[in-house]
Amino acid sequence: MTSTEARPVVRIEHAEDEKVYSTAGRGQTFGEILAKRLSRRDGLKGVVAASAITLAGTGAGFAAAQDGTPAAGTPGAGGNGLSFEALANGVGAEAIVADGYQFRPILSWGDPLTPDAPEFDVMAQSAAAQAQQVGYNCDFVGFISLPMGSGASDHGLLVVNHEYSSGELMFPGYVTVGPPAEGEDEPTLTFNVTQDIVDIELEAHGLTVAEVIRGEDGQWSLVRDSEYNRRITATTEIELTGPAAGTELLRTAADPDGLTVLGTLNNCAGGVTPWGTVVSGEENFNQYFANAASLEPESIQALSAARYGLNEEASDRQWESFYDRFDLSVEPNEPFRFGWAVEVDPLDPTSTPKKRTALGRNKHEGHTSVAVDGAPVVIYSGDDQSFDYAYKFVTAGNYNAGDRAANMDLLDEGTLYVAVFSEDGTGEWLPMIQGQGELTEANGFATQADVLINTRLAADAMGATKMDRPEDFETNPVNGKVYLVCTNNSNRGVEDNYGIDAANPRAANEFGHVIEITEAGNDHTATTFEWALFITAGPNNDQTTDYAGFDKSLVSGFSSPDNITFDALGNIWISTDGNDVDEANDGLFAVPTEGEERGYAKRFFQVPDGAECTGPVFTPDNSTLFVAVQHPGEGGYFEEQLNTWPDNENGVAPRPSVVVITRTDDPLAPIVAV
Ligand code: FEO
Ligand code: CA
Ligand code: CA
């Protein structure tokens, strides 16, 4: 494919720059903190899981499908089922899976989703076509068995979100590359944005609901005439619900009631609820809004714009040139209508998605839930920015396993908590309730809506622990512990930035880490917890790297952990975004969480150049693993593509795709069985 040496370097960043805060460094070295952690580790052994929990996205019946345990001393010993041979590090235009497994795209950008939808033609795109085709940059993947609640692993709904569009890869002529400006090394880039392009991009965002079915040959396919198939885009009407809905800051000229917003943007990690809805997080919504410099100084709009990183001047995307709602000089409140958790009912194709304001407003990730029949539901989420926070939401009402309708608005009422991680390995969930502690009118929080709309400002005031980009946050169905993935934070402790602490123990943390949390009494509604570092990621030869104490020379080192899922044996599967270990693309790594192989990370799947690996999820019987390959070819542009995966030699542009991974010898057999 295209040589990276022969063309100008075009790096178009879609994630926001890391937000930098002033320092409050605590003066501890990594060695001191690691020593404390190791001395604490033994004290956490033997904690067992609550048995009565229901974990969204996992299914019953897997244990019965297990037969055979590998001999001790071989990979997969201890019954963790991970007997595959780890993939060597690699790069290239192809995706690669470990020996013994096969993969195939099932939903690619542009695939027609309905009987009437046109076939994809990258040279003849239109907004109307895109609105009926799979969106761009798939991220979260949820699998919901059909019939709902059946635990079926051969038939279901895939709910996929589409984080953002990559105009430079999607559209011919989008980028003009000019010579460097005087005194600069990088070429000058001009983005040629038109109304047609913006309209297509709006339809390429959002979510896709797609019915999929597995044939007797083990091959999955889209049910194109399904009544469930649906696109939700950046122009779909979405209802604002919960305590902030209808309040002043959510009102705009187009929506004077503050109850209906057009679309959802930048959806990243999400979760499936036990009642079969999807909660998807709006992440870097800030990038779509322009001209924050025009906001009235000291106004809440201006303070919030600064804290959430909205563009001071024009945006790279230039949507504000075509739609006033993205221009803060015209519509200062529109950004308050993004940055929420969005709940979608994929089982009702006519349902209106809902932005659940009770879960707060930030750069949302995670939203994996835990529910016990007759008890409150707990949803964990991260705010993915350097020095931002980890949250959980506990519903006021109780989950009703026998009455789906009774659960449909549970997420409108409850308590949002933010995490404090203490040096001694304990932690506390602080309730974010107006009138309590620092959340007073004098501090700018006159109502609960103020707390929820500016969740970051509220958490700042409360002194929550500033984390290294908390992303996915999910419960292990076997040991009941909760795993918080911190992707990286290269600004930690650098210059005058905030310094290291026990839960974020590396300065200039470019590799990321995974924290293991045990809620008090294994009760997910508890307000205290114990925690420990599970993995401090990075290359095997980096002295700060630690894989739960496992022999580092044996593991597949990785960095920038991002999304996670669990198989039915309790192994954690970690996908990466920005793997920076030797010559290795991003990928998916399987890691036992218990037993003698705890920490033995093995590379299972590799994504092509430019891509990140996202959205891993198993069917309930673990025979199929769905993975999203996001932004393949990022770093190129339309006329100089890095690759055109998955079509490659037949392709014109890369197509972000959800792939299906199964065993090769028996696609119906569990992936982790031996
Ligand atoms: Fe869209 Fe935090 O990754
Ligand atoms: Ca991500
Ligand atoms: Ca996940």
Image (cartoon, rainbow, N blue to C red):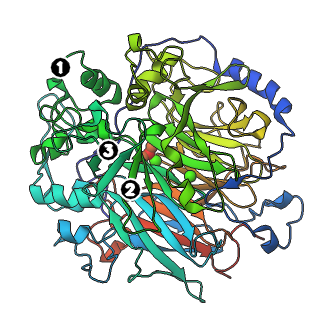
First reached walking from the N terminus: tag 3 or tag 1:
3
Q: Is mark 3 within 8 Å of ligand 1?
A: no
Q: Is mark 1 within 8 Å of ligand 1?
A: no
The percent coordinates of residue 91 (x first, y second) are: 47, 58
**Residue kind at label 2, given as amino acid type:** Pro
Front one among 81 and 366:
366
Nearer the camera: disc 2 or disc 1? 2
Q: Is residue 530 above or below residue 80?
A: above
Q: Quadrant of ligand 1?
A: top left
**Residue kind at label 3, given as amino acid type:** His
Circle 2 Cα neighbour tier, 10 Å, few/some/many (<14 / 14–19 / ≥20) = many
Could you tell me which quadrant the N terminus lies in? bottom left
Which residue is pictured at 29% across the width and 52% down the height?
Answer: 263
Q: CA distance from mark 2 to mark 1?
A: 32 Å
> In the drawing, does residue 483 fall left or right of residue 20?
right
Check disc 3 and report the residue beneath it. Answer: 14
The percent coordinates of residue 237 (x first, y second) are: 28, 55
Which residue is pictured at 45% across the width and 65% down the height?
Answer: 346
Name the element at disc 1: loop
Name the element at disc 2: loop
Q: Are marks 2 and 1 in contact (CB under 8 Å)?
A: no
Q: Is residue 313 above or below residue 413?
A: above
Check disc 1 and report the residue beneath it. Answer: 296
Does residue 449 appear in the picture of this structure? Answer: yes
The percent coordinates of residue 359 (x first, y second) are: 48, 39
Check disc 2 and report the residue beneath it. Answer: 353
